[in-house]
Image (spheres, rainbow, N blue to C red):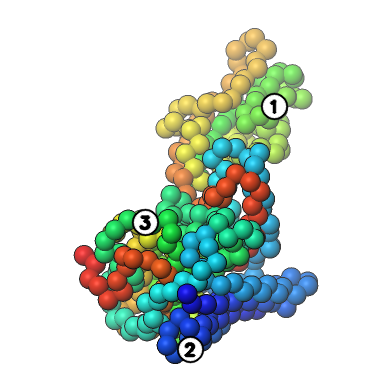
């Protein structure tokens, strides 16, 4: 475990007729115990550029990145030096507030995750050397006539949006991020795959089971106020 | 105008191989200006004995004004590490403040009920919480009744 200390100090000599001065400190612990948080995204800096897409908002942290209902903490800081420039901070679709130039925030994050879409595709029939299956931009070309070997080849690939595991000829695909990927419709259809079969019609890659996903509703999103360069500093402490 | 300074430090000597030391200080300004925020709800301490939802800073009327800005502070003063308070904004859960945890974040209240800051204790056996807003809103009433 690690020991991470956070301290907030607020002071003013003229907000009230008496001085305002208080300081609160905390050691960041895991949920429900005194074991220190020990994982972090690292201190990051994200540029928002005038050449970014029109919407310009960015997901700073995905709920998938942390444990749901963990004692996660998010730190954000607007590095702008122009008073009028701000980042609007959202949790999912809900606006939290605006971070103006130099402002920072430090808040807990439940990281409520959706569910990961998953499906099983099973190599079936007789595969020939050179036949292939493409999914998520990755093409697997068979180097063997053994159907299980082809399934193993499929499992060995690194998919941009999916992880895999294998059992004999059945490869289970699980989305890397919780969302409605739209690949699985019930348990009978898969979209986005391409089968190249040599002509005997005996090689197929049917989906044999699956479950649709749901999106996370707790991603941390920020939107800059101007279409010029703005920088955000951020860090996630998580369990 | 008032000058309210807020500082945050985050330190650790064993999270990384090297030490972590983040230190920030800023002044609470009105939106887009260098004029200090001049209103506060005051620092409130409450002892909550039910797991019902508490609206910390009720928005009673009006809509957002682009010139408005605010910061909120909330702390769970419990000493029992299993006790937490859940902080919500509108329909979203922000997170859980476990015993001793605090938060400091900007807040842009809109119309009534739209994105109120709410707190829900995890236990009914009594939890002390502390909270405060520093702002220039024209439409929040910390002692008001929010239905």
Q: Report the residue marked by disc 3.
A: B64
Q: Please say if B93 is above or below A188.
A: below
Determine which of the numbered discs, if any, sits on residue A139 in the image.
1
Q: To which quarter of the image does residue A53 belong?
A: top right
Q: Earlier in the sequence, mark 2 or mark 1?
A: 2
Between the residue at mark 3 and the residue at mark 2, the CA separation in whole angstroms equals 30 Å
Q: Residue at x 60, y 12 (%)?
A: A201
Front-lying residue, A37 or B133: B133
Judging by the rendered image, the residue that carries numbered circle 2 is A19
Q: Is residue A236 left or right of residue A18?
A: right
User: Label 1 is found on which chain of the structure?
Assistant: A
The image quadrant of residue A45 is: bottom right
Question: Helix, strand or loop at disc 1?
Answer: strand
- The total number of labels drawn is 3
Front residue of B122 and B94: B94
Q: Residue at x 29, y 58 (%)?
A: B62
Say whether mark 1 and mark 2 are on the same chain. yes
Q: Residue A23, position in %: x, y?
A: 54, 85
Chain where mark 2 sits: A
- Residue furthest to the top in view is A199
């Amino acid at each position: 475990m690690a020991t991470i200390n956070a301290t907030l100090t607020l002071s003013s000599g003229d907000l009230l007729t008496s001085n305002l001065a208080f300081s609160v400190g905390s050691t960041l612990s895991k949920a429900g115990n005194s074991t220190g948080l020990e994982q972090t995204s690292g201190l990051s800096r994200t540029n928002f550029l005038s050449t970014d897409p029109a919407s310009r908002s960015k997901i700073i942290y995905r709920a998938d990145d942390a444990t749901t209902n963990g004692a996660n903490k998010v730190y954000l800081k607007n590095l702008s030096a122009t008073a009028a420039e701000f980042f609007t901070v959202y949790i999912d679709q809900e606006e939290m507030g605006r971070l103006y130039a130099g402002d920072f925030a430090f808040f807990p994050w439940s990281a409520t995750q959706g569910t990961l879409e998953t499906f099983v595709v099973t190599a079936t029939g007789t595969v020939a050397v050179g036949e292939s299956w493409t999914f998520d931009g990755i093409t697997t070309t068979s180097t063997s006539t053994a159907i299980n070997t082809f399934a193993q080849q499929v499992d060995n690939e690194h998919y941009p949006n999916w992880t895999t595991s294998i059992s004999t000829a059945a490869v289970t695909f699980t989305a890397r991020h919780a969302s409605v990927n739209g690949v699985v419709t019930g348990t009978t259809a898969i979209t986005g795959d391409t089968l190249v079969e040599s002509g005997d019609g005996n090689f197929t890659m049917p989906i044999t089971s699956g479950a649709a996903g749901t999106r996370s509703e707790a991603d941390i999103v920020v939107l800059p106020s101007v279409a010029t360069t703005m920088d955000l500093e951020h860090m996630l402490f998580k369990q | 105008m008032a000058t309210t300074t807020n500082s945050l430090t985050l330190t650790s000597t064993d999270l990384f191989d090297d030490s972590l030391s983040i230190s920030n200080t800023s002044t609470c300004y009105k939106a887009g200006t260098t004029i200090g925020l001049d209103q506060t709800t005051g620092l409130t301490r409450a002892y909550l004995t039910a797991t019902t939802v508490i609206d910390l800073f009720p928005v009673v009327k009006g809509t957002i004004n682009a010139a408005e800005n605010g910061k909120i502070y909330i702390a769970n003063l419990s000493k029992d590490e299993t006790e937490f308070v859940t902080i919500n904004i509108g329909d979203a859960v922000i997170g859980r403040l476990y015993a001793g945890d605090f938060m400091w974040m900007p807040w842009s209240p809109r119309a009534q009920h739209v994105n109120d800051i709410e707190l829900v204790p995890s236990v009914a056996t009594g939890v002390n919480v502390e909270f405060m807003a520093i702002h220039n809103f024209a439409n929040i009433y910390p002692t008001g009744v929010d239905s």
